[in-house]
Image: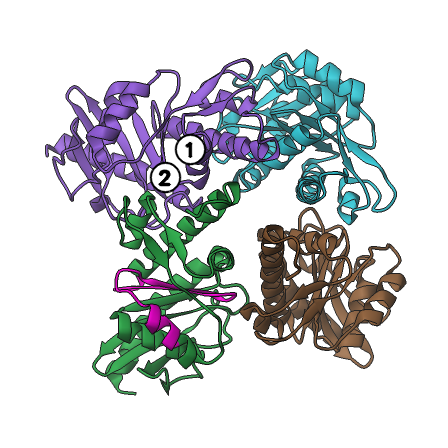
Chain colours: A green, B purple, C cyan, D brown
Amino acid sequence: MTRSDETNVAFACRALLKESIRYAEMGWMRGTSGNLSLVLARDPLRLAVTASGVDKGELTAADVVLVDGAGTALSGPAPSAEAELHARIAAVAGAGAVVHVHALAPVLAAERWPGGVPLTDVEMLKGFGRAAHGDKVVVPVIPNDQDMRVLGDAFETGFRADTPALIVSRHGIYVWGTDLRQARHRLECLEWLLRFALATSAEHPERGM
Amino acid sequence: MTRSDETNVAFACRALLKESIRYAEMGWMRGTSGNLSLVLARDPLRLAVTASGVDKGELTAADVVLVDGAGTALSGPAPSAEAELHARIAAVAGAGAVVHVHALAPVLAAERWPGGVPLTDVEMLKGFGRAAHGDKVVVPVIPNDQDMRVLGDAFETGFRADTPALIVSRHGIYVWGTDLRQARHRLECLEWLLRFALATSAEHPERGM
Amino acid sequence: MTRSDETNVAFACRALLKESIRYAEMGWMRGTSGNLSLVLARDPLRLAVTASGVDKGELTAADVVLVDGAGTALSGPAPSAEAELHARIAAVAGAGAVVHVHALAPVLAAERWPGGVPLTDVEMLKGFGRAAHGDKVVVPVIPNDQDMRVLGDAFETGFRADTPALIVSRHGIYVWGTDLRQARHRLECLEWLLRFALATSAEHPERGM
Amino acid sequence: MTRSDETNVAFACRALLKESIRYAEMGWMRGTSGNLSLVLARDPLRLAVTASGVDKGELTAADVVLVDGAGTALSGPAPSAEAELHARIAAVAGAGAVVHVHALAPVLAAERWPGGVPLTDVEMLKGFGRAAHGDKVVVPVIPNDQDMRVLGDAFETGFRADTPALIVSRHGIYVWGTDLRQARHRLECLEWLLRFALATSAEHPERGM
């Protein structure tokens, strides 16, 4: 690792730590679940990713790994296997940051709408980068798998540039943006939208949202 | 901006920041949603309003805008488009502070009671400025719109001086008072009442509240 | 007020402040709702009670009132009207501390079981001072009223020494104990029990608990 | 107690205190409910256990008890009666730490699945030490009892080395691991899984999970 890499990883670590603590406090990273990444360079692709098996509320500098575009570690401890999917999302979507959390609402929404979660005509969609009126958003849902290539292919098949999120069924959610803050804002708004969708569909089960 | 304006905006900023952090921690300002305003002068009307696109848990002095009675910025960054509605509520209702949050319960209540949310015979109504017994409160619900004039007209049509709140369907809630503290107390009590109404109507769907 | 009274009130204030902040953070004292009291002397009865209309997360020494057995202020600002009920509970039950909060679960339970909330065969009943097995607890529910004498009479009619709680329908809950800590433990356990009762009765609506 | 015992208990106390505060803040140790233990020695078995009747958010060094393999106190205040079950779990499962909390979801799950809670095909199962796919997990449920020998026998009858948890019906949950951190990670993931199971079974009551 060059000195410049080290500096970048140190910077990324502080940024990832701040987000991790926030998500952990929200109950979205229970146990050691979830992981966050930040793109450090584009060509070739380099990401700082949180390490596997670490409590995200207790992250330290030693728990952030530098990986390449295939999710392979260039330094530090073993990255999460999911680093490969982070790298693929960053490459395909051109994202600067990818957050993956185990919030409950997305996983419940995937059970209810296994073909994709429909969302439309809600103000909060603006916080997800879409329009508040007449915009028919469908958040892709893919089956869970331990093979990151299978997940990555399913992600790429359903990818649309205007929909910066992916729900992995019976697993969790990925949301991305140009940086960690935009990814966070999108995630928070989407999680709210999914709770709204679940609560209102329970009342009127005959119609979707 | 005169020096006196600057002093007022600086004071307002601290007050708005304190409330913002509180609401953000309650999950009522996810992403960059919601905005708060404080009336600084009446004639002509001047409000300090939180800026657009800012994370409300990270507000700084630079994120508060001075606007006039039309919601037009007199200083600082672009205000939220919703500043126009804040100003109109302040003018029509004579409010000293207006808070707009994206709590979930009001939006769910608007889905269930799109013609206005009925609340009666609950002690918490006193915290909303109404009576605990025999007082038939109806919280107005209006359709969402991106045109603040449309929202403002709908607000004014349904305005009653004794009902300091407005739910914008599939969007969020506005609550106001003489100052930020009274607005907060009313908002907190109303949000509790809406959760109570939703929970009890789910049990007895045949009757309203 | 004698110097000894002042010392007692100052002590009580710190204790009440600590509990207030805790309950406020739990969302059980929204707006300015709820009030807490601590018995300072028995004969004649003297209680320190939180003042009316105060945000319980922002309590200061000036917000605690010394009242007599009729709930009449002996010093300080106007007490909550509910101080009269606090005093009556302290007298009848021999309690050293009474806490009144607007948690949602008790109010929902009163809607479901207006004749009293039945609780039996749950370990958490031990934290309420009852037995975990075979003990048929019924938490009294009385109608809401603005006349504290009416509430007090209804309380006394249903009072049983082994059941340190009272739910006021469409209002909130009172729980008491020898001191603020015991009252808190009983309240926390009872609130948990009421959420359990509501959740399980929703699944099996045909049977009570 | 030898000096070495004292040192161990002091160390255990800090570790138990940290976990206690965390669980208390999550609402899983309401009142004085729940208790935590840490194995200090194996042969003979020695555990540090939290004392009975203590508010787990206010734990001090004086509230941790050294017990033997029968749950009998070797020092300090009276341990919780449940210390005997902690010791038995530590002995039978070879656990280094046992946590017992009164979270609501496990108790609700035991009402719905009194013969054991089935969980399968969810990623979060990895955080519980099981596989994310095709692994049919059943979390044992036993009836509540005040006799720790009865509880311990029921635990041992249903014990499987690959399932580090036990739900006591209408009471709470025990989870264990090699240390307090692993026990915590398993507990947090399992609690999430139980909320997921409850929410999805409510939608599709005809099928289990």
Chain for disc number 2: B
Q: Is A158 one of the magenta-colored residues?
A: yes
Query: Quadrant where the N terminus of chain B lies?
Result: top left
Depicted B1 relative to depicted D59: above or below: above
Note whether D194 is above or below D135 in the view shown.
Answer: above
Instruction: State which region is magenta.
Output: A152-180
In reply to whether residue B204 is colored magenta, the answer given is: no
The residue lying toward the viewer, choosing from D31 and A109, is A109
Q: Secondary structure at mark 2?
A: loop
For the residues bearing labels 2 and 1, Cβ distance under 8 angstroms: yes
Q: Position of residue D158 (x, y in %)?
A: 81, 70
Going from N to C along the chain, the mark reached first, 2 or 1, is 1
In front: C115, or A206? A206
| Residue drawn where x is 31% and y is 63% of the image | A180
The amino acid beneath tag 1 is: Ala
- Locate residue B171: give its quadrant: top left
Query: Which residue is identified by label 2?
Result: B170
Q: Residue D66 at x, y = what percent?
A: 78, 67
Type of residue at label 2? Arg
Q: Is residue A57 left or right of residue D157?
A: left
Residue under mark 1: which chain is it in?
B
Which quadrant, please, contains the C terminus of chain B?
top right
In-front residue for pair B15/D125: D125
**Image quadrant of residue B207?**
top right
